Image: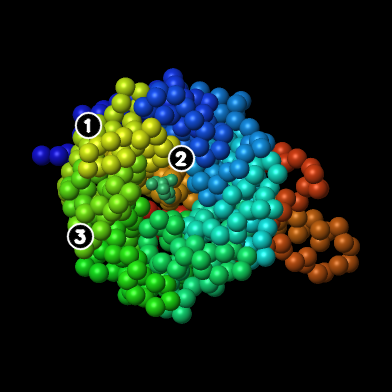
């Protein structure tokens, strides 16, 4: 009989993490990734010790505060984003910006020394902002939709292709709104929203988006519509953005897409790929990346269909002991050249959400299966290797950073049902911050939202720093009114495109910001935002 809080399993998952993590430190740091067959390292998505940034908050999740503190300070000392490197705008955002933001927000729990003004300022937040600023040139396009690649030192190359995938346009709002609301600089949230609105306008008459778009001409270059590779996290960010920011525009965009997706792509609780203008099936395949969908559906309260879809995907896992990248639904088998399993998290992620929502032990069983499979197939003397072919268990010389950031984190959280990241302090786990009554921030009160790389973000912190910024705006308005004797007119407030952010009153161009002293009003967050199970419990 499986138990959800099985200490033996938690221990085995921790051992898995440390075998991978120590191997990275021993053989690969400061490169981005470990090569687990040759026991050395390589730069992949940039040159910023990516695995260490991506794994940082997992250390805290597993309760290792001292190592979290040590690594946080190593990263501050060693990582430099002022480098002549072409980086993926999408990957840098979800792994680097997301990882640093999450570590910044968890720094207090990890016992780090905090500077005055935290969580609205801090060294890890400044690093995240620094990395994100390097991505901003990619958004300077006629449509506002970003290029896929940017050179961190020189900006976008004049020869850069304008063709990028849908997820590469629509996967910024969580990190960029967090940055804007914590720092008070609306630029990030504004560019993310502009890209989302531009993308929304390009949907077909039947309400679908394709896979690759020319961000200058807005022409769809690949017209396959589905929920997997190239698109997946766009839908994820509409839902999670709606939850985190209480944003009805994002929710209604998702709901419109969801109707079209259910209508045209769903068959027997599988999701196929269809032509975005006609709705005719173009590829009857299931992709491993699509396995996040049942978890996302459970966030919206659509449990029945989420459970059935999960069962379909789990049957594929059982057939191969992992999820092949592509699986042909009519043939019931893998697809040529897509037989690998690079230790992805998505099915485990969905299992975590569905176990929280249903308590059904099927989801724990998937966790045990995943643990056993990965140990048996992918473990090497110096790490865990991507599986090149699930049919014969050949391995690839690669351990992606998401194995530490996501796969192991979700696996651990599946077997730790009282973990603070499960939300809200409602289970008496001591995760509430003191001081709400006294008018201070109540962090962790609204649950956590995981970005698409499993980096938890705290919506309460956004609200708290946002309020702080609003207070400064009100003060600015009063000061300006007072400085204009006789003038009765109130200066118009500066606003973001979608919200109430403002520029700092004291800043002149080029001036450095000093950490603000924080005194937030009690934030009225309720468990309405709980990320687990049904999200919108009132009539929204
Ligand atoms: C991760 O980097 C993210 O989850 C992304 O959204 C999709 N690909 C990998 C994991 O499979």
The residue mark sitting in front, 3 or 2, is: 3
Residue occupying the point 44% across, 24% down: 40
Q: How is the image coloured?
A: rainbow
Q: Are marks 3 and 2 in contact (CB under 8 Å)?
A: no
Residue toward you, 147 or 299: 147
The residue that disc 3 covers is 331
The residue that disc 1 covers is 376
Residue toward you, 245 or 156: 156
> Which image quadrant: the N terminus?
top left
Q: How far across and how far down the image is residue 236, in percent? A: 42, 58
Q: Which quadrant would residue 321 be assigned to in this image?
A: top left
The residue that disc 2 covers is 433
Secondary element type, mark 1: helix
Secondary element type, mark 3: loop
Residue occupying the point 43% across, 76% down: 277
Q: Are marks 1 and 3 in contact (CB under 8 Å)?
A: no
The residue mark sitting in front, 1 or 3, is: 3
């Amino acid at each position: 009989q499986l138990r959800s809080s099985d200490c033996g399993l938690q221990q085995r998952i921790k051992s898995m993490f440390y075998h991978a993590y120590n191997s990275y430190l021993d053989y690969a740091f400061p490169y981005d990734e470990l090569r687990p067959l040759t026991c050395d390292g390589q730069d992949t998505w940039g040159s910023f010790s990516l695995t260490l940034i991506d794994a940082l908050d997992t250390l805290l999740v597993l309760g290792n505060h001292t190592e979290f503190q040590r690594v946080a300070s190593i990263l501050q000392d060693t990582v430099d984003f002022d480098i002549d490197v072409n980086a993926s705008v999408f990957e840098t955002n979800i792994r680097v910006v997301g990882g640093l933001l999450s570590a910044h927000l968890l720094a207090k729990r990890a016992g780090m020394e905090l500077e005055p003004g935290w969580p609205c300022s801090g060294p890890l937040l400044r690093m995240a902002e620094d990395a994100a600023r390097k991505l901003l040139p990619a958004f300077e396009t006629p449509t506002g939709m970003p290029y896929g690649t940017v050179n961190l030192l020189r900006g976008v190359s004049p020869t850069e292709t304008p063709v990028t995938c849908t997820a590469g346009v629509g996967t910024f709002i969580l990190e960029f709104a967090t940055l804007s609301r914590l720092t008070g600089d609306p630029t990030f949230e504004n560019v993310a929203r502009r890209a989302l609105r531009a993308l929304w306008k390009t949907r077909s008459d039947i309400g679908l988006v394709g896979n690759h778009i020319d961000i200058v001409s807005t022409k769809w270059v690949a017209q396959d519509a589905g929920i997997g590779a190239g698109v997946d996290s766009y839908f994820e960010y509409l839902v999670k953005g709606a939850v985190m920011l209480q944003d009805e525009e994002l929710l209604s965009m998702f709901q419109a897409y969801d109707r079209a997706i259910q209508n045209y792509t769903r068959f027997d609780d599988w999701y196929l790929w269809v032509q975005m203008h006609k709705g005719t099936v173009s590829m009857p395949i299931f992709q491993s990346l699509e396995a996040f969908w049942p978890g996302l559906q459970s966030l919206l309260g659509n449990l029945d269909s989420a459970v059935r879809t999960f069962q379909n995907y789990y049957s594929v896992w059982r057939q191969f002991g992992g999820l092949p990248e592509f699986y042909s639904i009519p043939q019931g088998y893998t697809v040529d050249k897509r037989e690998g399993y690079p230790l992805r998290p998505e099915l485990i992620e969905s299992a975590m959400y569905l176990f929280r929502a249903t308590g059904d032990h099927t989801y724990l069983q998937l966790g045990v299966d995943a643990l056993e499979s990965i140990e048996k197939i992918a473990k090497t003397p110096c790490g865990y290797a991507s599986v090149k072919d699930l049919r014969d268990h050949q391995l690839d010389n690669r351990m992606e950073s998401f194995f530490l950031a996501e796969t192991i984190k979700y696996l651990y959280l599946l077997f730790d049902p009282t973990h603070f990241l499960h939300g809200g302090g409602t289970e008496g786990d001591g995760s509430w911050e003191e001081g709400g009554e006294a008018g201070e921030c109540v962090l962790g009160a609204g649950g956590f939202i995981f970005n698409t790389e499993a980096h938890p973000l705290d919506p309460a912190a956004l609200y708290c720093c946002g309020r702080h910024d609003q207070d400064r705006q009100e003060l600015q308005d009063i000061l300006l009114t007072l400085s204009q004797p006789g003038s009765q007119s109130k200066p118009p407030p500066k606003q973001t495109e979608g919200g109430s952010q403002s520029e700092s009153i004291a800043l002149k161009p080029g001036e450095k910001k000093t950490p603000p002293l924080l005194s937030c009003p009690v934030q009225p967050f309720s468990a309405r935002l709980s990320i687990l199970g049904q999200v919108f419990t009132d009539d929204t």
